[in-house]
Image (cartoon, rainbow, N blue to C red):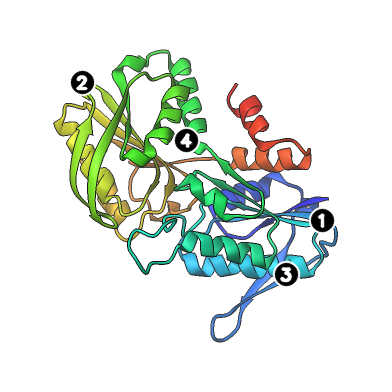
Amino acid sequence: MVKILVLEESMLGQKLLERYDNDDIVHYTLSRFKDGEIFIQLEEPVRDDDVMVIGSISAPVNENLVKFLVCIDALRRASAKSINLIIPYLGYSRQDRKVKPWQPISAKLVANLLEAAGATRLTTCDLHAKQIEGFYNIPIDNIPIQLILGNRWCKMKKEHGTLNTEDFVVVSPDAGGVARAREFMLQAGIDNLVMINKLREKANQVASMQILGDVKGKIALIVDDMVDTGGTLMRAAEELKKAGAEMVYVYCTHGVLSGDAIERLSNDEAIDGLYITDTIDKSRELINDKINYVDISDIIAGIINAFRKSKDIYNYINEELLP
């Protein structure tokens, strides 16, 4: 039997719980020792069950990572048949290589920890770097959310009937995101792609930007996998407006939104709208309607149902989400 264990209280988690019967859900109690150590008590047996553990390793990142490790261990010791992780946002994914000597590759360390704890499969969304898939010795599915969002944008365009794709241009904020932006562009039916060449001095700080392509008179759609502090996106939007873009909208899968990013992005004049999915829940902190959440609970539920029916996840995406 396939059962669902939602490991976090969030918009996405609550929407998923509402989709399933009580008998499909693994209930548990999470408590702490005096020193803050996490303890998880399963409330029912899971022997020979396939358990889907759902939650994001987002802020507080270290605590949520330990929650996963403790939960996996509890399920393994309770004789679960398989422990299948659905982690929409996989923390530590930005640390996927050594930029300088004597640095860790933390994405590989997290892979080792999840496998050692007993995970048997991982599903995540828009990994920061696809080579992270090679860090795992268990099956991993990397769901292309931006491809799906591009398809949804195309459907919205057809429903309104007033959007001319020639008025739009898709923008990749760096060379590494070109493939992701192209997926969005092709699904959206937009023909124009622009890249921003940026020189980064250190994390979250860009020294210079150069726009490669024409955006004059266009509505620019910046496509990226995540927005953290928002500084790079705000500067990119400013440069696009200077180059003649009429409006700038941002589509990011993961809204990390660290520090005062929400306030800064909400008040930024260059960005006309920011769309992020609910892989990370910062909804209680929003201050106006500039930042909008895109619900992906139907995508996650579809992945669970595909697993239940022993169907390939990518066939499900192609057949059900990208008609």
Where, by quadrant of the figure, is residue 143 drawn? top right
Mark nearer the viewer, 4 or 2 = 4
Q: Which residue is mark 3?
A: 74
Q: Which numbered circle lies on residue 217?
A: 2
Mark 2 is surrounded, within 10 Å at the Cα level, by few (under 14), some (14 to 19) or many (20 or more) other residues, namely: some
Residue at image coords 49%, 45%: 130
Q: CA distance from mark 3 to mark 4?
A: 34 Å
Where, by quadrant of the figure, is residue 198 drawn? top left
Q: Mark 3: which amino acid?
A: Ala
Q: Earlier in the sequence, mark 1 or mark 4?
A: 1
Tag 4's secondary structure?
helix
Q: Which numbered circle lies on residue 49?
A: 1
Mark 4 is surrounded, within 10 Å at the Cα level, by few (under 14), some (14 to 19) or many (20 or more) other residues, namely: many
Rendered location of residue 29, percent (x, y): 68, 70
Q: CA distance from mark 1 to mark 3?
A: 13 Å
Q: CA distance from mark 1 to mark 2?
A: 56 Å
Relative side of 18 to 293, left or right: right
- Residue 22 or 230: which is nearer the viewer? 230
Tag 3's secondary structure?
helix
Mark 1 is surrounded, within 10 Å at the Cα level, by few (under 14), some (14 to 19) or many (20 or more) other residues, namely: some
Q: CA distance from mark 2 to mark 3?
A: 57 Å
Q: Is residue 220 above or below residue 95?
A: above
Q: Mark 4: which amino acid?
A: Gln
Residue at image coords 46%, 60%: 92
Q: Which numbered circle lies on residue 146?
A: 4
Tell me whether the residue at label 1 lies in contact with that at label 4, contact meaning CB atoms closer than 8 angstroms. no
Tell me whether the residue at label 2 lies in contact with that at label 3, contact meaning CB atoms closer than 8 angstroms. no
Tell me whether the residue at label 4 lies in contact with that at label 2, contact meaning CB atoms closer than 8 angstroms. no
Tell me whether the residue at label 3 lies in contact with that at label 4, contact meaning CB atoms closer than 8 angstroms. no
Tell me whether the residue at label 1 lies in contact with that at label 2, contact meaning CB atoms closer than 8 angstroms. no
Tag 1's secondary structure?
loop
- Residue 19 or 173: which is nearer the viewer? 173
